[in-house]
Image: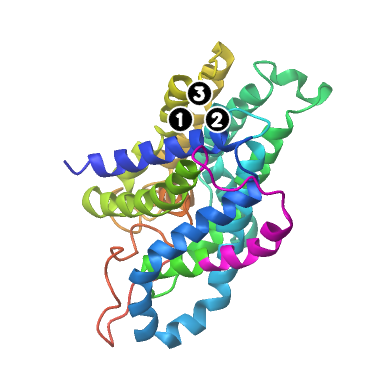
Amino acid sequence: MDILLPLLAVFLWGGNAVVTKASAGLIGPVEISFYRWLVAAVLLAPMAVRPILRNPVELRQNLLRLIVLGLMGCALFPYLMYLAARHTSAINIGIIQTVMPLFAIGLLRTMFGAPISRNAVLGAVISLIGVAVVVSQGHPFLLFSQQFNRGDLIMLAATACFALYSVLLERWRSALPMTTELFVQSAAAVAALFPAFLFANHEGLNQENFPLVVYAGALASIVAPLVWMKGIDRIGPARASLFFNLLPVVTAVFAVAILGEPVSGALMFGGALAIAGVALSARGGRAEASGQRPDQPNSLTPSSRMQTAFGSVKACTASLPNSRPRPDNLLPPKGIARSRTL
């Protein structure tokens, strides 16, 4: 069934939040980030070589942008996420990540003057209240009179970083296949992390942390985004974005079952608010002033676009789903242009 594709991707990403938390104490943030993207680059190389050789001009034109995206989305964001995992729970990581599309809406508005619907604003307020409830452990009014959890603050910074990455990702689309762009970004992350890797304290790969590195590098960074994109190709971005709302729920179930993390009433309430706010924000703008139906390709507003795109770019992929070719496609015949909207 087609709906199993985006659902599988969400399960793989939910598992990755648990892997991120489980890695704390077993391997350093720099070390696992380096190994993760090294694994991804090695696995992607065979799929990327042929398109690179066939399209050197396209690669040269987009190389600097892909390097910047690799530094932000593949190097900095995962590092901050692994660092946050040393101080906060996997459940908190999953919930805080849900507000990324809302951060992206704000950046789109600030940087490019993109319109924002009323539902997007209301959804943002609801989601931020939910995150405040989670971060404050059920006492949001005490946020300004108490010390924040370091891990939650780092995760908020990581989410803001990833939101900026997502916005630039939407603006900087190229004609290269997704696997090729992902390979270049992965290679850029490996090169950027290598100096820090040399001077970091090394735990070394062992039987405890090696499966975590393989999961992050292969399943979360390659399989999940490709399955997600295939699901979007089958059922459309609007329906796929609804499945993404399940991510914090899946993360919480895995964290409780595998890591034994406790779940409080405040955590459940705050998480529900965060999810509801993002869902409202995405729903509100799918058929705004243009008069298009939600199922039409260009009817997604910044809020729903960024939520839908988050699935693919979470693992450092490179496009909006409704305008990107299938991952296994090579470039189209000469003279046929790909659609570039926004």
Residue 113 placement, left or right of 180 = right
Residue at x 43% of width, y 83% of height? 58
Q: Nearer the viewer, residue 288 or 123?
A: 123
**Extreme left residue here?**
1
Which label sits on residue 89?
A: none
Binning the other alpha carbons within 10 Å of mark 3 as few (below 14), some (14 to 19) or many (20 upward) gives some
**Residue 102, above or below 56:** above
Do the residues under discs 3 and 1 have CB atoms within 8 angstroms? no
Note whether residue 108 is visible. no
Q: Nearer the viewer, mark 3 or mark 2?
A: 3
Which label sits on residue 259?
A: 3
The residue indicated by pointer 1 is: 251
Quadrant (top left, top right, bottom left, bottom right) of the C terminus: bottom left
**Residue 62, above or below 299:** below
Q: Marks 3/1: CA distance?
A: 11 Å
Residue 325 placement, left or right of 104 = left
Where residue 70 appears, x then y in whole percent?
56, 63
